[in-house]
Amino acid sequence: MALPNSTFDQLSAITTKYYIPKMVDNIFASNALLYRWKRNSDVYTSVNGGTNIVQPLLYAAATSGGWYSGADTLNTTDNDVFTAAEYDWRQNGYTINISRIDELKNMGSKEQIVNFVSAKVQVTEASMKESFGIGLFNAGTTTDAIEGLRAMVDTTSPTTYGGISGTDNSWWRATKSTSTVLSMSLLQGGYGDVTIDGDMPTVAATTQNLFDKYFDILTPQQRYADSKTADGGFQNLLFRGIPVLVDSHCPASYWFFLNEKYIKFYYHPDENFRFEPFQRVINQNVATAKILWAGNLGSSNRRMNMVFTSLTE
């Protein structure tokens, strides 16, 4: 006898209540950057629909003002200082499948089938971790994935990002360096390139090999770590007071300086790891549940980020 629909309803309820929240936490806790961003509502940002995700941008200084003396006429000229970047919606989805043969093998008790589904959820969780980890560094070449950090930062001119041309708009270009030798002075130069007064990078991300080289450069007295990041289980060191994080998905030879004030990880509140309950598939001897997400990664000020792409590991 196949599992009754009431059993699938119970499995769906258990999965929704106990497994999905834990899965979401584990997905974000699997990656140091995602871990930081999930805890920062200014970065992990809800967007309620729309054909595209629209991000307003301030790209020019107002000209309707200035110094004046006495009864001088004030400048009332209005100038257009706002535009908007637009990002496509990207979707991520995985299924949890229970085949008829799996039902037969686990019919001993309800606990047995629950344990089986738990194992299935863990496999799905691992797949979603990898999917988001890879997508985070997408260069824009995987068109269905989120527009990752390489698409955001790894260019100084021609590509269009967020619907805005970097060729035609210098204010929409990130900074890229092809220097090869890691040194404190090189890092300081890159950090300084995207620092304006008190507005500066808030985090760095790189590979394990470059992290190890940076560790060797520092003296023992300089090897401080960010305690909040360490509490999440992630190794890190500090550079100019900001955490330097290791990410296994970061491309070889890359070192990013990112200003999280201008990074947005958008999600739709109605498709934020939404769970669709188990249903029998018409043309297969299978019951399937779905876990679904929609959003994208974007920037509100691309030029405040930079990347080294060719550092020798």
Image (cartoon, rainbow, N blue to C red):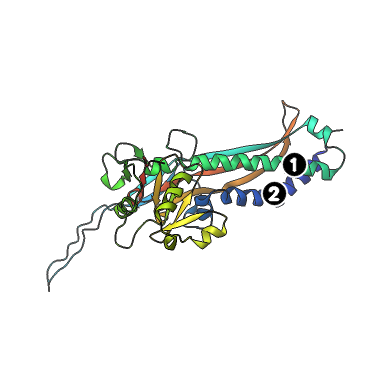
* Identity of the residue drawn at 54% across and 58% down: 230
The answer to which of 275 and 305 lies nearer the viewer is: 305
The answer to which of 7 and 124 lies nearer the viewer is: 124
Quadrant of the image occupied by residue 307: top left
The answer to whether 24 appears left or right of 113 in the picture is: left
**Place of residue 264 in the rendered image (x, y in percent of width and height, measured from the top left):** 45, 51
Q: Are marks 1 and 2 in contact (CB under 8 Å)?
A: yes
* Identity of the residue drawn at 26% across and 52% down: 80
Which amino acid, by three-letter code, is at mark 1?
Answer: Val
Secondary structure beneath dot 2 equals helix
* Vertical side of 290 occupied by 226: above or below: below
**Place of residue 83 in the rendered image (x, y in percent of width and height, measured from the top left):** 32, 49
Report if residue 134 is visible in the image.
yes
The answer to which of 50 and 166 lies nearer the viewer is: 166
Instruction: Measure the alpha-carbon separation of dots 1 and 2.
Output: 10 Å
Residue identified by numbered label 1: 117
The answer to which of 211 and 26 lies nearer the viewer is: 211
* Identity of the residue drawn at 52% across and 58% down: 229
